[in-house]
Amino acid sequence: MTPDLLTTTVVRGGSPLVVLSPHLDDAVLSCGALLAHARRYVPVTVVTLFTAATPPPYTLSARRFLRLAGMRDAEELYAARRAEDREVLTAMGIAWRHAGLTEGLFRRKPRRGTGEPRRPSRLLPERDHVYPTYRAHLIAGRISPHDDGVQRALARAVGALAVPPDAPDGTGPLLLAPLAIGGHVDHLLVRKAAEQCRRRVVYYGDFPYTRRHAVDSDFVQHNDLGRPVTWTDGLHAKTASILGYRTQAPLMFPGGRVPLSPEFYLLPRCFS
């Protein structure tokens, strides 16, 4: 497998590209350079799945996240993040969609029988949240049983994207989905939905998690994925796009110093 396969399959394969982005920056962080190039040849749409938060009370981890972002209200923060995403992607010439699901840090356990989120206790909101802490729960690599409803919603959304109702002869776009490197549950949920849609999927490395964590070899083997194919064209321009996420970039890249890490992708062996 060579970089030429990435070009012929993803960039100039003729199929529209739909990028599944867990959060409001993941697609540009992980795939921005490739997408900026690909959109010259095929339609590119970034679909961000987890784009919303909830009102207070918040967990301690959520309050810390808000404080680092310089905000007190999560819904206000996510309105700003959605606006940033629209601005960045529009400037890149890429279409966007926001699915409106609640991000994991703010997701609450469903009430029995109704599926509606619980109203959390102000004294100890952690007990009513699906992932009460960041390190021990949200990025621990384990999807909670309380997220079954979220997984079903994702499966429906991704299934509709994979085979649109107006697609001729059952064809559809080529999906790009996260490898979930780093174990963030929202990335794992999106990866699982992509895997289960049983359509053509190319998986991308989740930057900046790729700098500290390895690919899940069991997932690679189970899905018969080939060796990583890198993409380096346009990394400098990608940096400017990343910095357009003004509420998040300073937290990840102090001083605006974004590492010029090559993007990488895993394609199914059947593409070769």
Image (cartoon, rainbow, N blue to C red):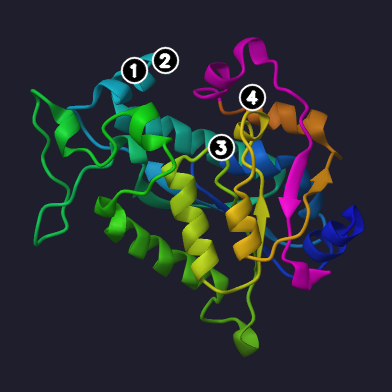
Identify the magenta region: 246-272
Q: Is residue 256 magenta?
A: yes
Looking at the rendered structure, the number of numbered marks drawn on it comes to 4
Question: Could you give the CA–CA distance between mark 3 and mark 1, rounded to whole angstroms?
Answer: 19 Å
Would you say the residues marked 2 and 3 are in contact, meaning their CB atoms lie under 8 Å apart?
no
Q: Secondary structure at mark 3?
A: loop
Query: Which residue in the protein does label 2 denote?
Result: 68
Query: Which residue in the protein does label 3 denote?
Result: 25
- Tell me the mark number nearer the camera, choosing from 3 and 1: 1
Direction from residue 38 to residue 4 in the image, left or right = right
Crowding around mark 1 (Cα neighbors within 10 Å: few <14, some 14 to 19, many 20+) is: some
Residue 160 visible in image: yes
Query: Which residue in the protein does label 4 denote?
Result: 243
Question: Could you give the CA–CA distance between mark 4 and mark 1, rounded to whole angstroms?
Answer: 22 Å
Q: Secondary structure at mark 4?
A: helix
Would you say the residues marked 1 and 2 are in contact, meaning their CB atoms lie under 8 Å apart?
yes
What's the amino acid at mark 4? Answer: Leu
Q: Residue 123, image x and y in percent?
A: 8, 23
Question: Could you give the CA–CA distance between mark 4 and mark 2, rounded to whole angstroms?
Answer: 16 Å
